[in-house]
């Protein structure tokens, strides 16, 4: 993944509903989810959700398949892994073993980053 692609991908994920939808599709795994299910699960009206899903699709983060009258969406794990590889590419001064503990953390161990106060 190059810098421009990473920017496009992160821009698509920088909105709460899109990030929530992407995470929901990751959880859904190989079975994916119908557009209406995503909409209902997140409490977003269908036409708004459709616009958000289109942005995620255009960024390459998800794919869709028409199944009769239903459109199912699936997370694109290759794109997600590509973004993570891009972000971790130069991690830890060339010593990737230093980053390994990051991948072993469970959800409860991850804390929110602190925002810096403006001076």
Image (tube, rainbow, N blue to C red):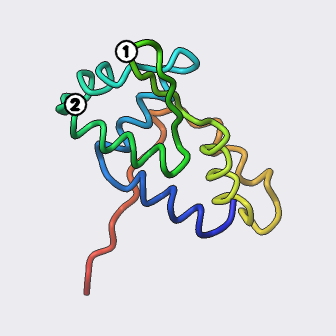
Res. 45 image quadrant: top left
Instruction: For mark 1, give the secondary structure.
Output: loop
According to the picture, the residue beneath numbered tag 2 turns out to be: 46
Mark 1 neighbour class, 10 Å CA radius: few under 14, some 14 to 19, many 20 or more: few
- Residue 87 % position (x, y): 63, 59
Q: In front: mark 2 or mark 1?
A: 1
Q: Could you say which is closer to the camera, residue 92 or residue 57?
A: 57
Q: Could you say which is closer to the camera, residue 52 or residue 71?
A: 71
- Residue 118 % position (x, y): 26, 82
According to the picture, the residue beneath numbered tag 1 turns out to be: 69
Q: Could you say which is closer to the camera, residue 118 or residue 28?
A: 28
Left or right, 22 with reference to 48: right
Q: Could you say which is closer to the camera, residue 17 or residue 103?
A: 17
Q: Residue at the spot x=59%, y=62% of the render?
A: 5
Q: Is residue 51 above or below residue 65?
A: below
Left or right, 93 with reference to 52: right
Q: Residue at the spot x=67%, y=50% of the render?
A: 82
Instruction: For mark 2, give the secondary structure.
Output: helix
The circle on residue 50 is none
- Residue 29 % position (x, y): 55, 21
Res. 11 image quadrant: bottom left
- Residue 66 % position (x, y): 47, 21
- Check contact, mark 2 vs mark 1: CB within 8 A: no
């Amino acid at each position: 993944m190059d810098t421009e692609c990473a920017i496009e991908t992160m821009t698509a994920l920088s909105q709460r509903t899109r990030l929530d939808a992407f995470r929901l599709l990751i959880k859904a795994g190989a079975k994916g989810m119908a557009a209406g299910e995503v909409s209902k699960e997140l409490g977003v009206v269908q036409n708004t959700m459709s616009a958000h899903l289109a942005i995620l699709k255009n960024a390459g983060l998800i794919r869709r398949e028409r199944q009769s009258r239903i459109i199912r969406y699936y997370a694109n794990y290759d794109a997600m892994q590509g973004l993570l590889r891009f972000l971790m590419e130069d991690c830890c001064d060339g010593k990737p073993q230093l980053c390994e503990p990051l991948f072993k953390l469970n959800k409860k161990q991850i804390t929110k980053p602190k925002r810096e106060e403006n001076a």
